[in-house]
Amino acid sequence: IDWTPIKEFKEILFTQHGGIAKISINRPEVHNAFTPLTVQEMIEAMHICRDRTDIGVVVFTGEGGKAFCSGGDQSVRGHGGYVGEDAVPRLNVLDLQKLIRSLPKPVIAMVAGWAIGGGHVLHVVCDLTIAADNARFGQTGPKVGSFDGGFGASYLARVVGQKKAREIWFLCDQYDAQEALDMGLVNTVVPLDKLEETTVAWCNKILQRSPLALRMLKSSLNAELDGQAGIQELAGNATLLYYLSEEAKEGRNAFIEKRQPDFDKYPKFP
Ligand code: 2NE
């Protein structure tokens, strides 16, 4: 599969194949642990994916075939967060999680090898997860002095149930791809050498579907769980659809033309 570079970064690869964008952490020597810079670059890539109308689906992954992501890079964990070149401690991966959640396009985690700690949370937050048969999943927080009580706990519990989510966090065990499939943590498991091919096939199928319907479905599924932020997303999409209507355009046109709007001709649907 040919991936064309979209933009050069230091710690990620950002490429495109047709309407599919791929954001790949490129730190295989540390199992794709993320630094504040890695996350900042992924955030920038996500903004580009949001703005580009030719991108319909985003794939999140890690380079090397041995790890999707092993969470925050513990070697740069400082006093109050992960520390980058500016010496400021950050937990900017939480901003990235929110962007994955609110991107009005499907985001697919393509997981080979380890999805651990904050890396596990990233795949959980993605809309779908396609796992290779070498994938291993788990949380480590209580082992390494950390935790993610946001999407990493509450949304995980929505995905696998409260009992299993508590087991995952309290025991810090690791689960293989089949166990992950059995608990509903991933959508499918494929041989490692078929991982990218399968992911691209799923993406291409999604790209044949109505983008507005996908957008509405993602925000509808989010809305139930995300409180006012979820309602804002869903309502924003309702505004988008309304702006496409003649009825809404009549309101704008009347204002521009300095006349009273005439809404009489628009049906009051049952
Ligand atoms: C992933 C795991 C289980 C793999 O074990 P193994 O034995 O296959 O590999 P190894 O030898 O541990 O790792 C290979 C190299 O990658 C580094 C290791 O230190 C090692 O480096 P060298 O010894 O070869 O120099 N490496 C792996 N993960 C790293 C990491 N996260 N940071 C820095 N270097 C890392 C095993 O590697 C493992 O358990 N890794 C740590 C997983 C972890 O605890 N992640 C952080 C969780 S907290 C978090 O992510 C977080 C949060 O909870 C809340 C907010 C934000 C972030």
Image (cartoon, rainbow, N blue to C red):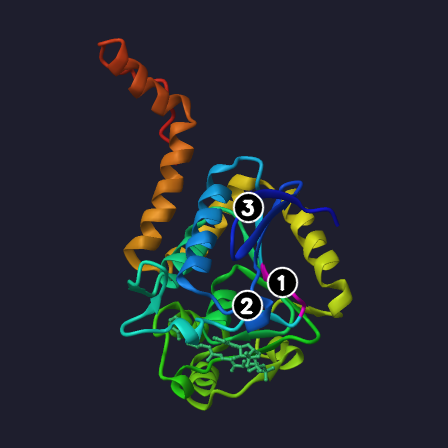
The residue wearing badge 3 is 8
Residue 72 position in % (x across, y down): 43, 71
Camera-near label (3 vs 2) is 3
Question: Is tag 3's residue or tag 1's residue first in the polypeptide sequence?
Answer: 3
Camera-near label (3 vs 1) is 3
In this view of the protein, which residue sits in the foreground, 189 or 1? 1
Kind of residue indicated by mark 1: Glu
Residue 190 position in % (x across, y down): 73, 69
Instruction: Answer yes or no: disc 1 within 8 Å of ligand 1.
Output: no
Instruction: Calculate the distance from the C-alpha at mark 1 to the C-alpha at mark 2.
Output: 7 Å
In this view of the protein, which residue sits in the foreground, 261 or 165? 165
The residue wearing badge 2 is 32
- Which residues, given as a range, are shown in magenta? 61-65
Question: Is tag 1's residue or tag 2's residue first in the polypeptide sequence?
Answer: 2
- Taking the magenta stretch, the answer to whether it contains residue 121 is no
Determine if residue 264 is in view. Answer: no
Numbered disc 3: secondary structure: strand
